[in-house]
């Protein structure tokens, strides 16, 4: 099974053009796709409803969209009639199998008074994978502050590990009197986290996720931490580039995008790679493969 994460930067490519077609081309063939910075109703972008357009270009996929940022973009016509629209900025999940349930989990947020800060979120999908349900998350962590990222990571880890105990968007064996669709969905123990984490390997935030390496044994696979699929596949921790600073005369290149798995899936990781050819965003599609 192939999984890919891609921060599409609202389809703004390295050449300054907005093109969703090449975003879709870059992720086509994956079994599960996680996207970040997907928008709706931003006037300067050519595709007003990016989730709908992506879904149109990938008609064989099930999908959900979760916008942590949701603002009014409504309009009135000459007769005073309101056309309700929302300007949205968020995460998307697509899968080749039904997404049985989804939840948008809002991450801790710190108000700023200078730089623009955005509400971040983690979009959960429970996917009806043939071998059994699989929990998958499309995540986007804060870009401004390590302190905010640490708070978000602590919240994220608590939700990841507590999900089987808490249950999903509905729980209880009783048949709903409202609609047959309102039924409990199993919440599996194992999970995958895909996304733009805005952190570098070896940082305090990265260590919070994967655990601190032992002085003698190095990194260990333990239940309370996640496994970086890039490293698990045999790549050096400090190698790989998934983000390029597009400001003029900048040579800043970092690995900010990750695929993490729960410890129970570590042995199923077969390989990981970065698509260095894609030009549809300031990020690169980041792939890995699970033997499931």
Image: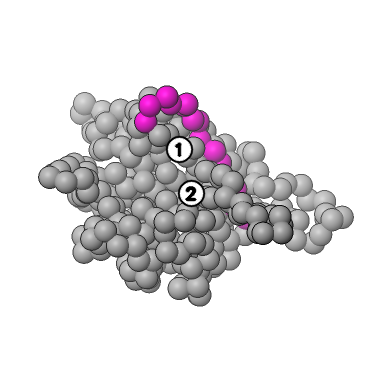
On residue 44, the disc is none
Q: In the image, what residue occupies the spot 26% across and 58% down?
A: 16
Is disc 2 surrounded by few (<14), some (14 to 19) or many (20+) residues within 10 Å? Answer: many
Q: Is residue 192 visible?
A: no
Taking depth in this image into account, of 46 and 70 the one nearest to the observer is 46
Residues marked 1 and 2 touching at CB (< 8 Å)? yes
The residue under label 1 is 118
Range of the magenta residues? 101-115
Q: In the image, what residue occupies the spot 82% across and 51% down?
A: 174
Task: Farthest residue to the right: give it.
Answer: 177
Q: Where residue 153 sits in the image (x, y, percent)? A: 43, 33
Quarter where residue 32 is shown: bottom left
The residue tagged with tag 2: helix, strand or loop? strand
Taking depth in this image into account, of 65 and 139 the one nearest to the observer is 65
Query: Mark 2 or mark 1, which is nearer the start of the sequence?
Result: 2
Taking depth in this image into account, of 175 and 112 the one nearest to the observer is 112
The residue under label 2 is 89
Q: In the image, what residue occupies the spot 27% across and 52% down?
A: 282
Against 95, residue 92 (above or below) is above
Q: Where residue 210 sits in the image (x, y, percent)? A: 34, 36
Taking depth in this image into account, of 235 and 246 the one nearest to the observer is 246
Q: In the image, what residue occupies the spot 49% across and 30% down?
A: 109
Quarter where residue 80 is shown: bottom right
Against 147, residue 86 (above or below) is below
């Amino acid at each position: 099974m192939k999984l890919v994460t891609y921060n599409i930067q609202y389809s703004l490519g390295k050449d300054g053009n907005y093109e969703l077609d090449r975003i879709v081309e870059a992720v086509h063939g994956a079994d599960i796709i996680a996207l970040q910075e997907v928008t709706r109703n931003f006037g300067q972008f050519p595709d007003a409803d990016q989730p709908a357009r992506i879904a149109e270009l990938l008609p064989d996929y099930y999908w959900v969209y979760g916008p942590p940022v949701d603002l009014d973009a409504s309009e009135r016509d000459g007769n005073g009639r309101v056309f309700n629209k929302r300007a949205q900025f968020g995460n998307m999940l697509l899968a080749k199998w039904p997404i049985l349930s989804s939840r948008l989990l809002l991450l801790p947020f710190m108000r700023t008074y200078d730089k623009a800060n955005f509400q971040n979120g983690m979009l959960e999908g429970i996917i009806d994978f043939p071998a059994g349900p699989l929990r998958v998350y499309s995540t986007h962590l804060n870009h401004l502050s390590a302190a905010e990222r640490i708070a978000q990571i602590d919240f994220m880890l608590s939700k990841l590990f507590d999900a089987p105990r808490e249950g999903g968007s509905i729980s209880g064996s009783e048949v709903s009197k409202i609609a047959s669709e309102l039924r409990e969905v199993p919440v599996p123990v194992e999970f995958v986290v895909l996304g733009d984490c805005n952190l570098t390997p070896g940082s305090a935030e990265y260590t919070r996720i994967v655990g601190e390496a032992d002085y003698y044994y190095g990194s260990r696979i333990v239940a309370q931490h996640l496994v970086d699929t890039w490293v698990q596949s045999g790549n050096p921790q400090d190698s790989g580039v998934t983000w390029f600073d597009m400001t003029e005369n900048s040579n800043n290149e970092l690995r900010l995008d990750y695929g993490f798995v729960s410890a129970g899936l570590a042995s199923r990781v077969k390989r990981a790679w970065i698509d260095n050819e894609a030009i549809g965003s300031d990020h690169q599609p980041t792939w890995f493969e699970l033997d499931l």
